[in-house]
Amino acid sequence: MMKKRNAIILIVTCLTIIGCKDFLDQKQNFAYSDGSSLSDIQAILDDAEYMNRRTPTFPQAASDDFFLPENAFNGRTERDRMLYTWELVDYTFPNDWANLYFQVFNANLCLENLDKLRANITDTRSWGETYGAALFFRAHANYWLVTTFAKAYDRDAADEEPGIVIRTTSDFNVPSFRSSLRESYDHIEADLRKAVRLLPKQVEVPLRPSQAAAYGLLARIHLVKREYDHAALFADSALAINREVLNFNDVGLNLASNLPFSEKYFNEVVFYSAIGVNTTSVAHPNNGRIDSTLYNTYHNDDLRKQAYFLPQGNGYRFKGMYIESVNLCFTGITTAELLMTLAECKIRQDQVEEGLGLIDEVLMNRFKHDSYEPAPLMPPEAALSFVLEERRKELLMRGLRFADIKRLNVEGRGVKLRRIVDGNEILIEPNDPRYAMPIPIDVIQNGNIEQNQY
C-alpha cells in the first residue's frame, strides 16, 4: 500500500509542478520504492538517468558555442527553430523545467523519508552522507533552473526580480509560486552549505556528490552572482581536495577518435552530469557546428584542437565531451573548470601573476609535451580578457556559456549573441529579457506562476 501511495504522490505532485499530463508517459523505475530504508533512498539518488543526465538543453541551444548549418536548421521542428533564434514563447512538455523539477521532487521525497528514518538509524554516517547527497541534488537542479529561467543576478535588483519556484516538500497541496531572485540563490547556497558538512570529501564514482562537488557548485553559484571573493574561496576549497588535471598527452588517450574521453570518470571530474534527455535537438553534437573563427583560437600545439573537433564540410563537429556517448553533452564539474574560475577571481582581485599561473596549470596539460610557453605577465584588463577567452575554450559545449554571457553583460562587457538564418542576421543584445528562458505555457496556465516578461 505504501509503495502505491508513494507512486501516486510522485505522479500527482509532478503534474502540479510540471503542469502536463504527458508526464504520465515517462517511465519511473523508482516510483515503486517505498523509501522505507536507507538503501531505497540511496537507490533513488543513484538513478543517474534521472538525477545526473537531466541538465537543461536550453542554455546550450541558445548560446553562441555553435551554429546550425542551413540544412540542419531547416530540418528542425518549429519549436527548435524558434529556440535557436530566441523566439520561443509558448511550449509544453517535455522540457527542461519538467526534468529539473523532477529532480527537485526526488530530492524532497528522499529528505522527507530520511527525516522519518533518523530516530532509528544506527549508521549515522551513511544517513548523513545520503542526506547531504539529497541536498546537493536539490541545489544542483535549482542552480540550473535559476541560471536558465531567471535573469542574471544583480544585487541591486535581486529582491524585485522573479527567481524560481522553491519546492521544499513533496506535498502537492502546497502551492507553487516564484520566489525572488535573491531568495532563490539564498536557498541554493543554504542547501550546499549544509551538504558540505555531511558529504564525504571524495567519492569513487563522481555520479554521487562529494564535499569537493558541493564546494565546486558553490563556486559556480558565486561566480554567476559576480561575488568573486566567495567564488575564489569555494573553488580553492574544492581544489584542496582534488587538483588533478587530465594530461592530454596521456598515452591512454586516442585524441583522434570520435570519443576520445569515453572513459568518463577521469580524476579531473569532480561531479558527473550531462545533457542526456534532449528536450530539443538543437544542441545535439551531431547537428551543431563550431565555426572556424572559434576553432582557430586554439593554438596548433593545443591538443584540444584534435580532441575537441572533427572537421566537417560546413565547420567542425564537437567531440570533446567527458562522456561515453556522442549523444550526450558533459556538463559536470571538473578541476580544470575550478582552476579557470579561481584564475579569473585572482585576476579580478589584482593578483594577476597568481591568476596566470593557474591558467598555466591547465594549459600545460592541454598542449603537446614541452610545447606550452607560460603566459607572460600583462596588465589586469588584458589578463582578464585572456582568462575569459581561455575559460570559453576549455569549457566549450558544457552548458555554461549562456550563464557566463549573462553575468559578463551585467558588468558591461557587451557580449552579443548572433545568428545567421537564410542570409539574415538575428541579434540578441546584452541584458535582453530573452536571456531568461520562458517558462512552459502549461505551467503558467495551471498555477500561480508568473511568466517572464519580454
Image (cartoon, rainbow, N blue to C red):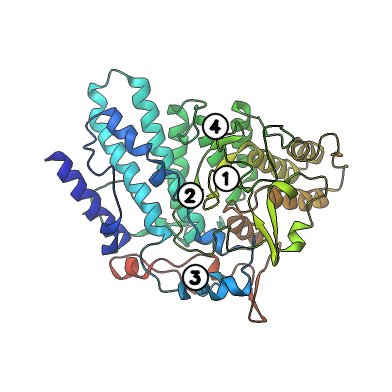
**First-in-chain label (4 vs 3):** 3
Amino acid at circle 4: Ala
- In the picture as drawn, the residue positioned furthest to the top comes out as 122
Amino acid at circle 1: Arg
Instruction: Kindly indicate whether the residue at mark 2 contacts the one at mark 3 (C-beta within 8 angstroms).
Output: no
Instruction: Kindly indicate whether the residue at mark 3 contacts the one at mark 4 (C-beta within 8 angstroms).
Output: no
User: Does any portion of residue 412 appear in the rendered image?
Assistant: no
In this picture, residue 201 sits left or right of residue 380:
left
**First-in-chain label (1 vs 4):** 4
Amino acid at circle 3: Asp
In this picture, residue 424 sits left or right of residue 75:
right
Q: Position of residue 74 (x, y in %)?
A: 55, 76
**Disc 1 marks which residue?**
220
**Disc 4 marks which residue?**
212
Dot 1, how many residues are within 10 Å of its Cα: few (below 14), some (14-19), or many (20+)? many
**Disc 2 marks which residue?**
143
Q: Position of residue 91 (x, y in %)?
A: 40, 71
**Marks 1/3: CA–CA distance:** 28 Å
**First-in-chain label (4 vs 2):** 2
Dot 4, how many residues are within 10 Å of its Cα: few (below 14), some (14-19), or many (20+)? many
Mark closer to the observer (4, 3):
3
**Disc 3 marks which residue?**
80
Mark closer to the observer (3, 2):
3
Kind of element beneath mark 4: helix
Instruction: Kindly indicate whether the residue at mark 4 contacts the one at mark 1 (C-beta within 8 angstroms).
Output: no
Amino acid at circle 2: Tyr
**First-in-chain label (1 vs 3):** 3
**Marks 1/2: CA–CA distance:** 9 Å
**Marks 4/3: CA–CA distance:** 36 Å
